[in-house]
Image (spheres, helix red, strand yellow):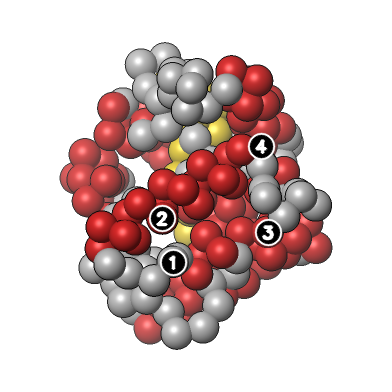
Amino acid sequence: MPIESWERVFADLAALSTVIAYDRPGTGRSARADGTQTGVDITGDLRALVTTLEVRPPFVLVGHSLGGLFANLYARRFPAEVAGVVLVDSSHPSQIATSDTSGTPVARLLQAAFGVVDRIRRAKPSAEIGSLETTARQIEAAGPFPDIPLVVVTGTKSLPGWLVPRAEFDRHLACQRDLVTLSPQGRQVMAERSGHMVQITEPELVVEAVRDVLALARR
């Protein structure tokens, strides 16, 4: 999702701390990457960005959907630079990784959805989506997730059953619960009025989660 999907949380978050928001290559107004866009590539780009901006760690990372995969990997690759993480209806590596080349239903849905967007934009297929299985393997091979404050914000409303089967949504909820166990300090917040886009439908929950993680990290 582009930067604009976070507009309802920016002002409140900026009152708490410095906020860096950016469109990854191929998202929003950012140009597409020339090469691969695996999790290692994306987390490396983020690290280069904050270095260029001269913003010193540690950071609280906030990742939605696929962004949660990259926040997960960044915290494992550079644990000394991460003070806390907020995952907003984040993807789970096991929802992506599969030995079946056709992919899991979630992966197929993501590929189909981004394919529609790419056709509308008359753009090439997203390198990020094409690298998801590699990203999942990179997370598995990385070091452990650090013992830091972690909040998992989960949307409770499913898409229609013809689009996402109930069994797949139940698996998603189970994966959300598993994400909470990444850190001994993990906890879950259920967004009762939201589906996948919690930062749009219940922005106050996202702001509260970031506020709580910041407070714990500073403490």
| Residue drawn at 32 percent across, 69 percent down | 123
Residue at x 51%, y 65% (from the top left corner): 128
Instruction: Judge whether 195 appears above or below 52 on screen.
Output: above
User: Residue 118: where, in percent of width, then height?
Assistant: 34, 61
Q: Amino acid at mark 3?
A: Glu
The mark nearer the N terminus, 1 or 3, is 1
Q: CA distance from mark 2 to mark 3?
A: 17 Å
Q: Is residue 143 visible?
A: no
Give the label, 4 or 3, closer to the camera.
3
Query: Could you give the CA–CA distance between mark 1 and mark 3, rounded to whole angstroms?
Result: 16 Å
The amino acid on which the numbered mark 2 sits, given as a three-letter code, is Gly
Residue to which mark 3 is pinned:
133
> How many numbered marks appear?
4
Marks 2 & 1, CB-CB < 8 Å contact: yes
Of badges 1 and 3, nearer the viewer stands 1
Among the two numbered marks 2 and 1 on one chain, the one whose residue lies closer to the N terminus: 2
**N-terminal of the two: label 1 or label 4?**
1
Between label 2 and label 4, give the one nearer the viewer.
Answer: 2
Dot label at residue 179: 4
For this orientation, the residue located farthest to the top is: 192
Marked residue nearer the N-terminal end (2 or 4): 2
State which quadrant residue 199 falls in: top left
Q: Is mark 2 in CB contact (under 8 Å) with mark 3?
A: no
| Residue 110: image tag | none
Q: Nearer the viewer, residue 46 or 209?
A: 46
Q: Position of residue 61 (x, y in %)?
A: 48, 53
Say what secondary structure mark 2 lies in: helix
Report the disc number at residue 125. 1
Q: Which residue is mark 2?
A: 115
Label 1 crowd (10 A; few <14 / some 14-19 / many >=20): some
Q: Nearer the viewer, residue 196 or 206?
A: 196
Label 4 sits on what residue type?
A: Leu
